[in-house]
């Protein structure tokens, strides 16, 4: 049995019994234990969330595959929502002094057990994260935690572990839903090659998995089994191991599918039309990320951050290369018109100005909104993240924030990236699927407030059981 050590941690009991943690010790035994059923079932909010609705959801390749399955970060999911608790768990916290009542998510990327129960069905405690990005959207009702086999190594031995919970959050918009995020016990913060390091090396979908992906084969929309798919895992604690891109797709601007179930739409509307207007927001260059993007791990990416992180490469008809680097500048081609970058979208709602209290959706999509001539758009070849010099790299939510604690190991920034652009101007490469919602006695009123009540009651019931 593989044993790994959480650095500077205390030990607690896994809520679903899939990992054995010795109270008062630092050794966490990881074993391929079967999932333990909860007689209460998942939270009502989770059942609402995981219904099979896809609207104009993106396809990222012609075949179903796992595009990335990298270790996310360690130990900061399921932490009591106070500054002291987050810092004790080696999470990042930023005070944001001078701002009145900043939102919790603007201060930390750590999630509370209550919030996790709302979004993932069950609470977890001091859990690690691992996002799995598919090339096709998933049918949410087919998702089961026990279908994911995570190969974890200490450098000599490989053991299979399973996640405690899995959800489509934060990719809950109807036109997304191709990324699943898992929480559980997957490793520690030591980089591969370091003595004592424990980390995932591969994610595999079990042979008997129920998980289905929805896409298109030979012009027909089909549901296919994800069983047997696998992907090697990257490590965010290795140099340049932070998040990167696995897709970029240029299409005509559309707001179809820009929605989410009631109570899960707190950062909506955030589409290009809402931010920049129907007349100007003509094209959308959507990028797909391996993990949540942030300038430091906590602070949200803002709609006016294009010049801070990105460049676009355009190859003109005469063979010359034009780098599109500034927002609001009209870039002229030799003979096919121009391109103007308006800014970023699919983040949070528009505001008159942006500061560190702004909270976006922290999902795996960012939209670059463009205006100009279609012929010129077709000349765009790549999205670049320079990640050095005048350009800031991206961190996943395990990063240090603005006020990282000295001596604590956080995730590393992501690497230089040059991502080819998929042209979807003629074929948007999207699918729509809507099953009949299952009967439910859930009555959601008051939006997010009702969801929070569900989560608190569920958590209290589990603790008193």
Image (cartoon, helix red, strand yellow):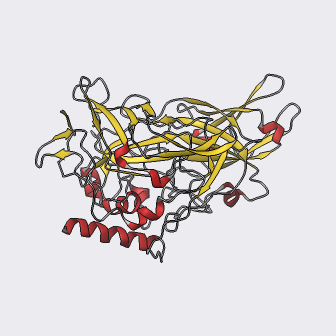
Q: Position of residue 54 (x, y in %)?
A: 59, 55
Quadrant where the N terminus sits is: top left
Q: Nearer the viewer, residue 12 or 96?
A: 12
Residue 19 can be seen in this image = yes
Q: In terms of depth relative to the viewer, which is nearer, 63 or 329?
A: 63
In-front residue for pair 270/359: 270
Q: What is the number of callouts on the image?
A: 0
Outermost residue on the left side: it is: 24
**Residue 402 seen in render:** no
Expressed as whole percent of the image width and height from the top left, the position of residue 388 reads 53, 31
| 45 versus 138 height, above or below | below
- 445 left or right, relative to 53: left
Q: Position of residue 395 (x, y in %)?
A: 45, 40
Relative horizontal placement of residue 315, taking residue 19 as reference (left or right): right
Residue 416 in the figure: left or right of residue 449: right
Quarter of the image holding residue 9?
A: top left
Q: Which residue appears at 78% of the width and 35% of the height?
A: 378
Relative to 334, is 222 above or below? below
**24 sits left or right of 347 in the view:** left
Residue 331 drawn at (x, y percent): 79, 38
Between 318 and 441, the residue placed more toward the observer is 441
Quadrant containing the C terminus is bottom left
């Amino acid at each position: 049995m593989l044993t790994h050590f959480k650095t500077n941690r205390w030990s607690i009991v896994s809520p679903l019994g899939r990992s054995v943690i010795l109270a008062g010790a630092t050794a966490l035994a990881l074993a391929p234990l079967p999932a333990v059923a909860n007689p209460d079932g998942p939270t009502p909010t989770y059942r609402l969330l995981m219904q099979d609705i896809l609207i104009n959801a993106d396809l990222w390749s012609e075949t179903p595959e796992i595009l990335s399955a990298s270790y996310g970060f360690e130990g900061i999911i399921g932490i009591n929502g106070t500054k002291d608790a987050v810092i004790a768990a080696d999470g990042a916290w930023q005070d944001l002094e001078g701002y009145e009542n900043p939102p919790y998510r603007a201060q930390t990327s750590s999630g509370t057990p209550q919030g996790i129960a709302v979004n993932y069905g069950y609470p977890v405690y001091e859990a690690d994260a691992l996002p799995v990005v598919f090339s096709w959207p998933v049918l949410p009702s087919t998702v089961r935690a026990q279908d994911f086999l995570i190969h974890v190594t200490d450098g000599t031995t490989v053991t299979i572990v399973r996640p405690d919970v899995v959800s489509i959050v934060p990719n809950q918009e109807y036109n997304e839903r191709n990324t699943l995020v898992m929480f559980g016990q997957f490793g520690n913060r030591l980089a591969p090659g370091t003595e004592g390091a424990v980390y995932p090396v591969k994610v595999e979908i079990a042979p008997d998995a129920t998980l289905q992906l929805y896409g298109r084969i030979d012009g027909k929309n089909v549901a296919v089994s994800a069983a047997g798919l696998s992907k090697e895992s990257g490590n965010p604690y290795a140099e340049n191991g932070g998040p990167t891109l696995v897709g970029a797709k240029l299409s005509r601007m559309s707001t179809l599918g820009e929605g989410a179930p009631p109570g899960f739409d707190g950062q909506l509307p955030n589409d290009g039309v809402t931010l920049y207007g129907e007349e100007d927001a003509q094209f959308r260059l959507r990028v797909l990320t391996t993990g949540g993007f942030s300038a430091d791990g906590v602070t949200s990416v803002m709609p006016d951050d294009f010049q801070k992180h990105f460049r676009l490469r355009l190859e003109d008809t005469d063979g010359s290369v034009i780098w599109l680097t500034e927002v609001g500048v009209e870039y002229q081609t030799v003979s096919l018109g121009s391109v103007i970058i308006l800014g970023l979208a699919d983040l949070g709602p528009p505001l008159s100005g942006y500061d560190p209290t702004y909270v976006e959706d922290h999902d795996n999509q960012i939209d670059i909104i463009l205006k100009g001539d279609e012929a010129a758009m077709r000349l765009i070849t790549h999205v670049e993240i320079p990640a050095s010099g005048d350009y800031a790299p991206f961190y996943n939510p395990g990063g240090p924030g603005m006020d990282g604690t000295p001596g604590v190991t956080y995730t590393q920034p992501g690497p230089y990236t040059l991502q080819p652009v998929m042209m979807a101007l003629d074929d948007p490469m999207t699918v729509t699927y809507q099953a009949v919602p299952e009967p439910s006695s859930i009555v959601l009123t008051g939006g997010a407030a009702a969801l929070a009540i569900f989560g608190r009651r569920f958590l209290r019931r589990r603790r008193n059981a």
